[in-house]
Every structure is written in C-alpha cells, then in structure tokens.
Image (spheres, coloured by chain):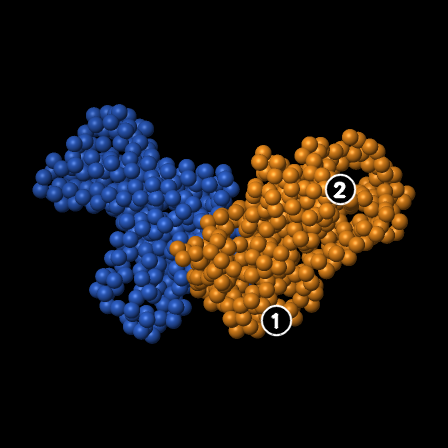
Amino acid sequence: MTDEQGTSGAVLVVGGGISGLTATLEAAEVGKDVFLVEKNPSLGGRVSQMYQYFPKLCPPSCGLEINYRRIRDNRGVRVYTMTTVKSVSGTPGNYEVVLETAPRYVNSNCTACGACSEACPDEVDNEFNFGMDKRKAAYIPHEMAFPRRYVIDKEALSAEGAEAIQAACKYDAIDLDMPAETRTIRVGSIVWATGWNPYDASKIENLKFDQSDAIITNMMMERLASPNGPTKGKIVRPGDNKEIESVAFVQCAGSRDENNLRYCSYVCCMATFKQITYIREQYPAAKIYVYYIDLRTPGKYEQFSDKLMDDKNSFFIKGKVADVIPEEDGGVTVIAEDALNAKKISQKVDMVVLATGMQAVQALAPLPVALHTDSDGFIISENEKGMIAAGCAKKASDVVTCTQNSTAAALKAIQISGR
Amino acid sequence: MDVQPDLDLIRTLKATGGDTLKMCYQCSTCAVVCPLSTDGNPFPRQEMIYAQWGMADKLLKDPNVFLCHQCGDCTASCPRGAKPGDVMSAIRSYAYTFYGWPKPLAKLCANEKGLPWLVGIPTVIILLMWMISGGMTIPSHEEFAQHGYTQFFGHWGFKWYAKNIFFIVLIMVPSLGLALYSAWRGLTTMWKAMRKEAGLEGAYRPSANQAWKEFIWPSFVEILQHKRFDECGEQHNRKTGHLPLMLSFIGLLIVTLWSLFRQDVLGLIYPSLHGPLPMTDPFKVFANVCAIALIFGIAVLWSNRVRLEKDNKTLPTFFDWFLIWEIAAVGITGIGAELFRWMGMPVVGYVIYFLHLVSIMMLFLYLPYTKLAHILFRTTAYAFDKYRESSFAKQ
C-alpha cells in the first residue's frame, strides 16, 4: 500500500526519543506539518528506560507525559511507530521520503486490556530491561508505552501461542496477516534524532561483562532501580538477587579508549553520581567504590558530586579498572592502580557497574541516506541541505543539551521548510 | 612540588621510540595489565608521567624501568595509543647512555647517527692490528686446511703464547675490560641512587655473601629459567627466541674459555692441541649447537619484531635493531667462516672471519651502552627488586 502525503512545507523527524519529540513539537507548535517516525513500537527512547534523569532527577513520566499530551493535541503531527526511513530523494526543501512501517499485528481496535499477553505462552528476553527478565511474545513495551497499544513479536510466537492470543482478544484487534506498509511523504527538511545505543560492554574484553551476572552496565542499573523494571525497583544482584553490600563503579568503561569508543560520552560521571543516590536510598551503609580517570561534573553539577563524595562509605579511586575477576561466590574482584598512592589494589565487591558510554546509532547501522558524519558516527548538520542533526545523533549529551539542540534543530528545519 | 622539566630527556625519549609518550592520560590501565608489575611497585604508569614531566632523576633511580621485559601487553591495552612499552624501552636506552662511561662512546651508541663510527672504530682497530701483526696475507689452500683461522694474525716460534691468541686478546680484552669497567661504574652509581630513592639508605646492609645468596644468585636462576618472560601475554613466543639465544651466549662463553685454556695452557704441554678443533671434538659439537641456537634465536626475535612493526604495535628503533644486527652478524659471520673453511675458500673465509672479529668487538666494546646492557642493568634491577622486598629493607 502506498499513498502520498505531505508538502514541501512539512518536516520529517527521524527518531521519537526526547530529542525527536522536542524537535517535533517545536516545529509543529509554530504551525508546521511534522511527520515523526520511530523504529520502536513506542516513543520515549532511552529516557523512558531511566529511573530518574537530570537535571532534577525526575522520573521519565515527568517530561515524556507532557510531550505525549502535546503531540496528541496537535493536529499537525503524524506519528508512525515501528517505522524506518527507506530512502530519501529530491532536493533541499523538496524531499521525497519512503517510509516503511513494520507490521504490529495489532490494529486500532486494541484497548490495551492485556488479555493477549496473559494468554500468550511464549516468552523471550526483554530488551527493554536488557535481558534481565522475560516478556511475552504479545506485549506492551512498558507501562508508559505511547502509543498505548500491544505488539506481537511474530518471530517469538508459536502456533499454539497464535491461537491462544487470538482466542483471548475480545476486540478482534489481532491481525497476524498484517503486511508491512510503505508510504511516500514529501517534506522540506529532515531532523535526524536517531539517538544512541549503550556501548556494547562485551566488546571491552578486560572487563569481562559476559562472564558474570554481577557485572552490569549503567543502563541496566537504571532498569534495576526503576519501579517498572525487572525487580520492581529493588536493586539486587542479577542472577541470585543478593542484596548489595558493596558496589564498584567502573568509569570510562570503553570510553576515551582507542580500542573502543574514542570519545568521552559526557554523561557517565554524572550518571554514576546519580546512581549512587539510587543505592544510598536502598542501602544506606553499602560500600561504594568509584574508579575513575578524571571525574567530569559539567556546569553546576560539582555541588551535586561534592555532597556525594563526602559520604564516608563512598570511596573514589583515581585509576581505571583494567582487570576484573569473577569470584566463585558470585561477587567480583576489580583491580586498579590507585594512582595517587602508586599501589595496585584489588577490591572484592558484590556488584560492578560499568559506566559505558553512548554510541551513535548510525555508527553501527548505517542510515539509508549518505549524511555527513564525523569519524565516530555522529551526524554533522548540513543546514543548507535541510539535513539537521539533533540530540545524541549529533553528539553524546545529557537530556538538557538534547532538548536545547533539538529546539535549535527545529528552528533550522522550519526555515528550510518555509522557503 | 617544584618540577624543573628536563627538556632534553623528553626530546631524547621522543626521538628514540617514545614519540607517543605525551598521549598518556594516566589511567593506569598499563600498570594493571602488566604481568610483571607488583601490587607494591606498579609500573609503567608512574614512569610515563615522570617521562612526560621530564623528571630524569626519578627515572634513572627507578628499578621498574629495567624490570620491564617489553612484552607489549601495556601497549596493546593502552586506550590512548601511548605505547608505554616503547616509552619504557626509550627510557632504558636513555639510562644506558646516562650511566655509560666514557661519555662520548656512550653517546655514539645512543642513535643511528653514530652507526658509521660504531662500525668504523672496530674495523679500523682490527685492520690496524692485522697490519701490525704482519699476518695480513691470505694463506694457501694447504695452510688454510691445516690451520684454519688460527694463524689469522700470523704465527711466531714463541711456543708459550701463540701470536694469533696474543692479538685477539690484545683486541678483545681491552674492549671487554673497558665495557666491564664502565658497567661497574654505572651499576654501582645506579644501585646507590636506587637505594637512596627507595629510602633504604639507613637499611641494614647485607654482607657480600648474603647479597650473593639472597639477591644475586636467585636472580641468575630466575633469568636462566626465563620466569618473567613466561608471564608475558602479547608476545609469548619471544621466549622461544630469547631463551636459546641466551643459552647459546652462555654456551659460547664456555667454549671460548675452554678454547683459551686448551690453546694457551694445555697447548704448552701438548703442541698438537693448537689448530682448529676437529669436528668430532665434543666442544666443537657443542659450539656448533650453540651457533645454531644463536642463529635460530635471533631469527625468531628478528621476525617477531618485523611483524610487530608491520602491525604498528611498536616503532622501529635503532636501539632495538642495532642489537639484533650485531648478534645476527656475529652468528652469520661465525657460521660463515666455518663453512668457508670446510669448503677450502681462504679468501672469502678470511674476509668473513675479519667481519666476525669486528662484530664480536662491537658486541664487547658497546656492551654497556647498547640494548645488550640489559644483561647488566636488568640483572642488577632483579637483585635490587629482591633487596627492596627483603627483610633487610623492611627494618
């Protein structure tokens, strides 16, 4: 099925995370037609996986919810989830974009009652929680998913499963023969808010991420701490659910490293400080060890870190963890040189958090359009062409910076579209 | 802390393989991945910042510099491509020059600019000796078959001491003597400085016997067993080259001493012992085995280095290559001279034998200034490492 819509005055925003949402709304609320495409079944991106986010340590519902509301209220916005850009042709101010929407296998009759999920016997690793728990093959990505509609993971669905969910649905919402859809739209400019992925920790050979359940990433910590996470917000060691008496944060895990990500991801130091507050909430006396090369606390965040560094059960060691030994009892020993004392130290802890960095999505999966990127895959805006980068597609940054540069991106986009 | 950077140090290190040293941002990955660095004395992170800040005095008193076996594990893991392994090697080269005496000779060995002199000096000396000896004639096939190279410097009727041996001793003993004197000066100075730096000046001094038994002999044993080489991860097969090479050096030393004893002492009683050893002589067999081990060892190390350089894991440096060339030259000319003797080709044989003498003199004369000095300095550092960890130091 192909239909043509849009005008040269419209804007396409690729990516429905906090940056894409911001750019969409900024452009739409000055009267532009905006197409927002998101490859996942729901909007919200990485922010929706957080427990809390800077600057005010809000839960993601605060911030995302208001944006969803604004989108619903705006007749100029069209949202396509499970949709990717297939090709872009034409000239600046007059692009023709082919979008492909993967089948959701659930139509608009869905009331999100959850009966299909309950009836579904098939389970797979839950990617939203980084595989720390399972989800059904008929599922809603997470409690706050927008649009609020179930999805069927057909690859994970067995024949019995298919029967069961169809029988369970009272609204005739399941359509397992739903085809992929292609549509062509015309837009004046494109905002690329393709976002980021957490750097694959198993690539950092010496940190042995794959060898112990007790070694997690900072994004996994966000899920552990989240009330809608795999442990309902209780921070425990994955695998044996042990309560945490000691934890080591490994800063620059794969960052500022020629063998992994060459750059500093900007957010990881503050993410660690934030996660120290998560641990303190639940374990007031747990020993916390932070191994760092340099602690970077941009802007006024130094006050935040100062307060946490005063804690007598928190230890900050200048020296990168370069070796990790998974122990028999499920714990982990981390080894670093304390550069201030010039002694090598081994510290056994219950859990290790790797502060992994942000990798541009297009660094791993090339976009269908030849965009100008730097050597790390971050997009360099070409404003005159109407190809504008926003958020973490442009550079690794925190939410505040993302929303600022997404607003700026919207401004560039409407100038091209308005010509 | 008042740091007066020694800019000359920084420039020298950068020019001799340590050009990446300023990349280091002190993350300490190197000190953790280094299989030889201990909990109490981690390296090379500290050495990197001493080098960056031009703190030559710190580096020259640091046993860790010499405890490094240049396996390259740190370089492979370095997140910045600072190549700490190469920097450590450059620091050692700097230290050999610093502790070397006489200074001009030491400086000549510091970089490739000295190469013409390094080859020229022994060539001229041996050529002069050859001329002075009056033996500068190519022998007939019969003479060559009978005497081999034992009359290279001619012969005289004085049976107590062969003329050939006289000249070889005249060339090699002063060369080695100067080297050993220089090494003694350097090593004692370094030992004292290390003691002071480690705060061991007031520590109880072991007697010579205790020092031998507790520090020096165990170091020899450890070196013979190549224990620390075993620890290296990245270039484990370096041991495959280095162990036979080291054993061949020891073997050839024994053969040389035996040859000297046989010709100069036993030869007085049994004149028939003069002349080349027969092929069936157990020492000749042993010598040939050693020669093959030497060629094999240096070939392994040569090809390792070529591969590393190709993979951009290390930089080609004069410091490393000069020693490889030297040893390869000794081995090839040694075997070559023997082969041409068997083939009865005196002209080629004599030329190669001449080059053999030149390469051996180079090995001896430049011992304390080139990479070969690691025999002296690393062994001393082993002993110091055992000393600083011993109960003597803990008092």
Camera-side residue: B174 or A166?
A: A166
Q: Which residue is mark 1?
A: A306
Camera-side residue: B28 or B44?
A: B28
Coordinates of residue A260 in the picture (x, y in percent):
56, 48
In the rendering, what colour is chain A?
A: orange
Coordinates of residue A137 in the picture (x, y in percent):
61, 42
**Are callouts 2 and 1 both on one chain?**
yes
Coordinates of residue B96 in the picture (x, y in percent):
41, 55
Q: Amino acid at mark 1?
A: Asp
Q: Residue at x 62, y 45 (%)?
A: A117
Circle 1 marks a residue in which chain? Answer: A
Q: Is residue B196 visible?
A: yes
Q: Secondary structure at mark 1?
A: helix
Q: Residue at x 32, y 71 (%)?
A: B394
Q: Is residue B95 visible?
A: no
Q: Which chain is blue?
A: B
Q: Residues within 10 Å of mark 1 (few under 14, many from 20)?
A: few
Q: Residues within 10 Å of mark 2 (few under 14, many from 20)?
A: few
Spatial separation of the CA atoms under disc 2 and disc 1: 51 Å
Horizontal side of B125 relative to B44 (left or right) equals: left
Q: Secondary structure at mark 2?
A: loop
Horizontal side of A57 relative to A157 (left or right) equals: right
In the figure, residue A100 lies in which quadrant? top right
Circle 2 marks a residue in which chain? Answer: A
Q: Which residue is mark 2?
A: A108
Q: Quadrant of the C terminus of chain B?
A: bottom left
Q: Earlier in the sequence, mark 2 or mark 1?
A: 2
Q: Nearer the viewer, mark 2 or mark 1?
A: 2
Coordinates of residue B60 in the picture (x, y in percent):
43, 61
Camera-side residue: B172 or B42?
A: B42
